[in-house]
Image (cartoon, grey):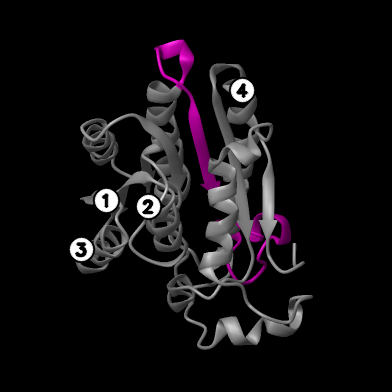
Protein backbone atom coordinates (compact mmCIF):
# COMPACT_ATOMS: atom_id res chain seq x y z
CA UNK A 1 0.00 0.00 0.00
CA UNK A 2 1.13 3.56 -0.72
CA UNK A 3 1.84 6.11 2.01
CA UNK A 4 -0.98 8.14 3.58
CA UNK A 5 -2.54 10.31 0.87
CA UNK A 6 -5.34 12.10 2.76
CA UNK A 7 -9.06 11.47 3.01
CA UNK A 8 -11.26 10.35 0.13
CA UNK A 9 -15.06 10.34 0.22
CA UNK A 10 -16.85 7.94 -2.10
CA UNK A 11 -20.61 8.43 -2.19
CA UNK A 12 -22.56 5.30 -2.92
CA UNK A 13 -19.38 3.42 -2.07
CA UNK A 14 -20.88 0.14 -0.93
CA UNK A 15 -21.40 -1.47 -4.33
CA UNK A 16 -20.69 -1.32 -8.05
CA UNK A 17 -18.39 1.38 -9.36
CA UNK A 18 -18.33 3.11 -5.97
CA UNK A 19 -17.11 -0.05 -4.26
CA UNK A 20 -14.40 -0.60 -6.87
CA UNK A 21 -13.26 3.02 -6.54
CA UNK A 22 -13.20 2.85 -2.75
CA UNK A 23 -11.03 -0.28 -2.83
CA UNK A 24 -8.54 1.24 -5.27
CA UNK A 25 -8.33 4.51 -3.33
CA UNK A 26 -7.77 2.58 -0.11
CA UNK A 27 -4.96 0.62 -1.72
CA UNK A 28 -3.46 3.90 -2.97
CA UNK A 29 -3.10 5.16 0.60
CA UNK A 30 -6.23 7.24 1.12
CA UNK A 31 -8.35 7.01 4.24
CA UNK A 32 -11.66 6.18 2.59
CA UNK A 33 -15.07 7.31 3.78
CA UNK A 34 -17.48 4.77 2.32
CA UNK A 35 -20.87 6.47 2.11
CA UNK A 36 -23.96 4.31 1.80
CA UNK A 37 -27.71 4.94 1.89
CA UNK A 38 -29.11 1.64 3.18
CA UNK A 39 -26.87 -1.42 2.74
CA UNK A 40 -24.82 -1.34 5.93
CA UNK A 41 -23.59 -4.90 5.43
CA UNK A 42 -22.14 -4.15 1.99
CA UNK A 43 -20.47 -0.96 3.24
CA UNK A 44 -18.93 -2.79 6.18
CA UNK A 45 -17.56 -5.40 3.78
CA UNK A 46 -15.82 -2.70 1.74
CA UNK A 47 -14.29 -1.29 4.92
CA UNK A 48 -13.05 -4.76 5.90
CA UNK A 49 -11.58 -5.38 2.46
CA UNK A 50 -9.65 -2.12 2.60
CA UNK A 51 -8.41 -2.85 6.12
CA UNK A 52 -7.35 -6.37 5.11
CA UNK A 53 -4.85 -4.82 2.69
CA UNK A 54 -3.48 -2.45 5.31
CA UNK A 55 -5.66 0.52 4.45
CA UNK A 56 -7.97 2.73 6.48
CA UNK A 57 -11.70 3.18 5.94
CA UNK A 58 -14.95 3.96 7.71
CA UNK A 59 -18.56 3.54 6.61
CA UNK A 60 -20.91 6.53 6.99
CA UNK A 61 -24.63 6.22 6.35
CA UNK A 62 -26.32 9.11 4.59
CA UNK A 63 -28.69 10.07 1.79
CA UNK A 64 -26.93 12.54 -0.50
CA UNK A 65 -30.31 14.08 -1.34
CA UNK A 66 -30.47 15.31 2.27
CA UNK A 67 -28.39 18.38 3.08
CA UNK A 68 -28.23 17.36 6.74
CA UNK A 69 -26.84 13.95 5.77
CA UNK A 70 -24.30 15.50 3.41
CA UNK A 71 -23.08 17.87 6.13
CA UNK A 72 -22.78 14.96 8.57
CA UNK A 73 -20.85 12.96 5.97
CA UNK A 74 -18.29 15.69 5.48
CA UNK A 75 -18.02 16.33 9.22
CA UNK A 76 -17.19 12.65 9.66
CA UNK A 77 -14.48 12.99 7.02
CA UNK A 78 -13.09 16.09 8.75
CA UNK A 79 -12.41 14.03 11.87
CA UNK A 80 -10.17 11.70 9.89
CA UNK A 81 -7.82 14.20 8.29
CA UNK A 82 -7.52 16.44 5.24
CA UNK A 83 -10.03 15.87 2.47
CA UNK A 84 -8.22 15.37 -0.84
CA UNK A 85 -10.71 13.45 -2.98
CA UNK A 86 -14.46 13.36 -3.56
CA UNK A 87 -15.92 10.72 -5.84
CA UNK A 88 -19.50 11.76 -6.60
CA UNK A 89 -20.76 8.28 -7.39
CA UNK A 90 -24.16 7.97 -5.68
CA UNK A 91 -26.99 7.78 -8.18
CA UNK A 92 -30.13 5.89 -9.14
CA UNK A 93 -31.68 4.77 -12.40
CA UNK A 94 -34.98 3.11 -11.55
CA UNK A 95 -37.42 1.15 -13.67
CA UNK A 96 -37.01 2.24 -17.27
CA UNK A 97 -40.00 3.80 -18.99
CA UNK A 98 -40.98 6.59 -21.36
CA UNK A 99 -41.00 10.10 -19.95
CA UNK A 100 -44.80 10.36 -20.26
CA UNK A 101 -45.08 7.46 -17.81
CA UNK A 102 -43.08 9.17 -15.05
CA UNK A 103 -44.60 10.49 -11.84
CA UNK A 104 -43.51 13.78 -10.33
CA UNK A 105 -42.49 11.96 -7.16
CA UNK A 106 -40.16 9.67 -9.07
CA UNK A 107 -38.64 12.49 -11.09
CA UNK A 108 -37.95 14.58 -8.01
CA UNK A 109 -36.34 11.67 -6.18
CA UNK A 110 -34.06 10.90 -9.12
CA UNK A 111 -33.04 14.53 -9.63
CA UNK A 112 -32.53 15.04 -5.88
CA UNK A 113 -30.08 12.16 -5.70
CA UNK A 114 -28.36 12.36 -9.08
CA UNK A 115 -28.09 16.13 -9.38
CA UNK A 116 -28.68 17.82 -6.02
CA UNK A 117 -26.64 15.20 -4.17
CA UNK A 118 -23.64 15.73 -6.43
CA UNK A 119 -23.93 19.52 -6.25
CA UNK A 120 -24.20 19.54 -2.43
CA UNK A 121 -21.22 17.21 -2.05
CA UNK A 122 -19.16 19.23 -4.52
CA UNK A 123 -20.02 22.40 -2.60
CA UNK A 124 -18.79 20.95 0.68
CA UNK A 125 -15.66 19.57 -0.96
CA UNK A 126 -14.77 22.97 -2.43
CA UNK A 127 -15.16 24.58 1.00
CA UNK A 128 -12.48 22.23 2.32
CA UNK A 129 -10.15 21.88 -0.65
CA UNK A 130 -10.01 25.37 -2.13
CA UNK A 131 -6.94 27.49 -1.43
CA UNK A 132 -9.41 30.39 -1.28
CA UNK A 133 -10.74 28.82 1.93
CA UNK A 134 -7.35 27.83 3.31
CA UNK A 135 -7.33 24.34 1.80
CA UNK A 136 -4.50 22.57 0.04
CA UNK A 137 -6.31 21.50 -3.12
CA UNK A 138 -7.80 18.21 -4.19
CA UNK A 139 -9.71 16.31 -6.83
CA UNK A 140 -13.42 15.87 -7.47
CA UNK A 141 -14.51 13.10 -9.81
CA UNK A 142 -18.13 12.99 -10.90
CA UNK A 143 -19.91 9.95 -12.31
CA UNK A 144 -21.62 10.75 -15.57
CA UNK A 145 -23.09 8.32 -18.08
CA UNK A 146 -23.06 7.62 -21.79
CA UNK A 147 -26.82 8.24 -21.50
CA UNK A 148 -26.11 11.98 -21.43
CA UNK A 149 -24.81 11.70 -25.00
CA UNK A 150 -27.17 8.99 -26.29
CA UNK A 151 -30.32 10.36 -24.64
CA UNK A 152 -31.68 6.94 -23.57
CA UNK A 153 -34.97 7.22 -25.54
CA UNK A 154 -37.72 4.95 -24.21
CA UNK A 155 -35.33 3.76 -21.53
CA UNK A 156 -34.65 6.68 -19.23
CA UNK A 157 -34.70 10.17 -20.69
CA UNK A 158 -34.96 11.60 -17.17
CA UNK A 159 -31.84 9.64 -16.10
CA UNK A 160 -29.99 10.89 -19.18
CA UNK A 161 -31.04 14.46 -18.34
CA UNK A 162 -29.70 14.09 -14.81
CA UNK A 163 -26.36 12.90 -16.16
CA UNK A 164 -26.32 15.78 -18.65
CA UNK A 165 -26.43 18.05 -15.61
CA UNK A 166 -23.38 16.23 -14.24
CA UNK A 167 -21.51 16.95 -17.48
CA UNK A 168 -22.25 20.66 -17.12
CA UNK A 169 -21.36 20.64 -13.41
CA UNK A 170 -18.01 19.09 -14.27
CA UNK A 171 -17.12 21.58 -16.97
CA UNK A 172 -18.35 24.66 -15.13
CA UNK A 173 -17.01 23.85 -11.68
CA UNK A 174 -13.74 22.66 -13.17
CA UNK A 175 -13.18 26.11 -14.64
CA UNK A 176 -14.52 27.90 -11.56
CA UNK A 177 -12.01 26.42 -9.13
CA UNK A 178 -9.11 25.67 -11.48
CA UNK A 179 -6.96 28.41 -9.93
CA UNK A 180 -7.77 27.25 -6.38
CA UNK A 181 -5.96 23.92 -6.45
CA UNK A 182 -9.00 21.80 -7.26
CA UNK A 183 -9.36 19.65 -10.34
CA UNK A 184 -12.91 18.61 -11.29
CA UNK A 185 -13.38 15.85 -13.84
CA UNK A 186 -15.82 13.09 -14.67
CA UNK A 187 -15.92 9.60 -16.06
CA UNK A 188 -18.71 8.70 -18.46
CA UNK A 189 -19.36 4.95 -18.13
CA UNK A 190 -21.26 3.01 -20.74
CA UNK A 191 -22.72 -0.45 -20.12
CA UNK A 192 -20.97 -1.64 -16.98
CA UNK A 193 -21.83 -4.91 -15.25
CA UNK A 194 -23.12 -3.56 -11.92
CA UNK A 195 -26.23 -3.87 -9.78
CA UNK A 196 -27.76 -0.63 -11.08
CA UNK A 197 -29.13 -2.48 -14.09
CA UNK A 198 -31.21 -4.69 -11.77
CA UNK A 199 -33.49 -1.70 -11.15
CA UNK A 200 -34.19 -1.16 -14.84
CA UNK A 201 -36.94 -3.75 -15.03
CA UNK A 202 -35.31 -5.27 -18.13
CA UNK A 203 -34.05 -8.77 -17.38
CA UNK A 204 -30.61 -9.43 -18.89
CA UNK A 205 -30.21 -5.81 -20.03
CA UNK A 206 -26.42 -5.92 -19.91
CA UNK A 207 -26.24 -9.00 -22.11
CA UNK A 208 -28.82 -7.56 -24.52
CA UNK A 209 -26.68 -4.48 -25.10
CA UNK A 210 -23.45 -6.26 -26.05
CA UNK A 211 -23.98 -6.10 -29.81
CA UNK A 212 -24.41 -2.30 -29.61
CA UNK A 213 -20.98 -1.91 -28.03
CA UNK A 214 -18.07 -1.68 -30.49
CA UNK A 215 -15.90 -3.80 -28.18
CA UNK A 216 -18.72 -6.39 -27.99
CA UNK A 217 -18.61 -6.69 -24.22
CA UNK A 218 -19.77 -4.91 -21.12
CA UNK A 219 -17.29 -3.10 -18.92
CA UNK A 220 -16.24 -3.96 -15.39
CA UNK A 221 -16.57 -1.67 -12.38
CA UNK A 222 -12.83 -1.99 -11.87
CA UNK A 223 -12.17 -0.55 -15.32
CA UNK A 224 -14.14 2.57 -14.45
CA UNK A 225 -12.42 2.75 -11.07
CA UNK A 226 -9.02 2.74 -12.80
CA UNK A 227 -10.02 5.90 -14.67
CA UNK A 228 -11.29 7.46 -11.44
CA UNK A 229 -8.04 6.68 -9.65
CA UNK A 230 -6.05 8.25 -12.50
CA UNK A 231 -8.13 11.43 -12.28
CA UNK A 232 -7.40 11.58 -8.54
CA UNK A 233 -3.66 11.12 -9.03
CA UNK A 234 -0.81 13.47 -9.91
CA UNK A 235 -0.62 11.71 -13.27
CA UNK A 236 -3.61 13.83 -14.34
CA UNK A 237 -2.28 17.05 -12.80
CA UNK A 238 -3.06 19.13 -15.92
CA UNK A 239 -6.54 17.71 -16.46
CA UNK A 240 -9.64 19.55 -15.27
CA UNK A 241 -13.14 20.14 -16.60
CA UNK A 242 -12.77 16.97 -18.64
CA UNK A 243 -15.12 14.00 -19.17
CA UNK A 244 -13.52 10.65 -19.94
CA UNK A 245 -15.69 8.02 -21.65
CA UNK A 246 -15.26 4.49 -20.32
CA UNK A 247 -17.74 2.82 -22.63
CA UNK A 248 -16.07 0.40 -24.99
CA UNK A 249 -16.53 2.89 -27.84
CA UNK A 250 -20.29 3.36 -27.38
CA UNK A 251 -20.71 7.08 -26.71
Question: Which residue is painted at 36% across and 32% down in the image?
Answer: 83
Mark 4: give few (<14), some (14-19) or many (20+) Cα within 10 Å.
Answer: some
Q: Whole-Å distance between the Cαs marked 2 and 3?
A: 19 Å
Mark 3: give few (<14), some (14-19) or many (20+) Cα within 10 Å.
Answer: some
User: Which numbered disc covers residue 18?
Assistant: none
Instruction: Report the residue marked by disc 4.
Output: 178
Which residue is nearer to you in this view: 199 or 50? 50
Question: Which residue is painted at 54% across and 22% down in the image?
Answer: 181
Regarding mark 3 in the picture, which secondary structure is present there?
helix
Q: Which residues are magenta?
A: 130-159
- Picture coordinates of residue 154, whole percent (x, y): 63, 71
User: Which numbered disc covers residue 40?
Assistant: 3
Regarding mark 4 in the picture, which secondary structure is present there?
helix
- With 128 as the anchor, is 172 left or right in this view? right
Instruction: Report the residue marked by disc 1.
Output: 57
Say if mark 1 contacts mark 2, CB within 8 Å.
yes
Say if mark 3 contacts mark 1, CB within 8 Å.
no
Instruction: Report the residue marked by disc 2.
Output: 26
Vertical position of residue 220 compared to residue 178: above or below = below
Amino acid sequence: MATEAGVAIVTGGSRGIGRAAALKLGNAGYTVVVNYAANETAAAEVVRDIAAKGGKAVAVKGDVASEADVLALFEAADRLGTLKVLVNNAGIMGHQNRLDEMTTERLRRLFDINIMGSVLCAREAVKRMSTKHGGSGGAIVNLGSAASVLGAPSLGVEYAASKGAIDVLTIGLGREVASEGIRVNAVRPGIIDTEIHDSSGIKGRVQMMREQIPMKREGKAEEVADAILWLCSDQSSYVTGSIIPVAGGRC
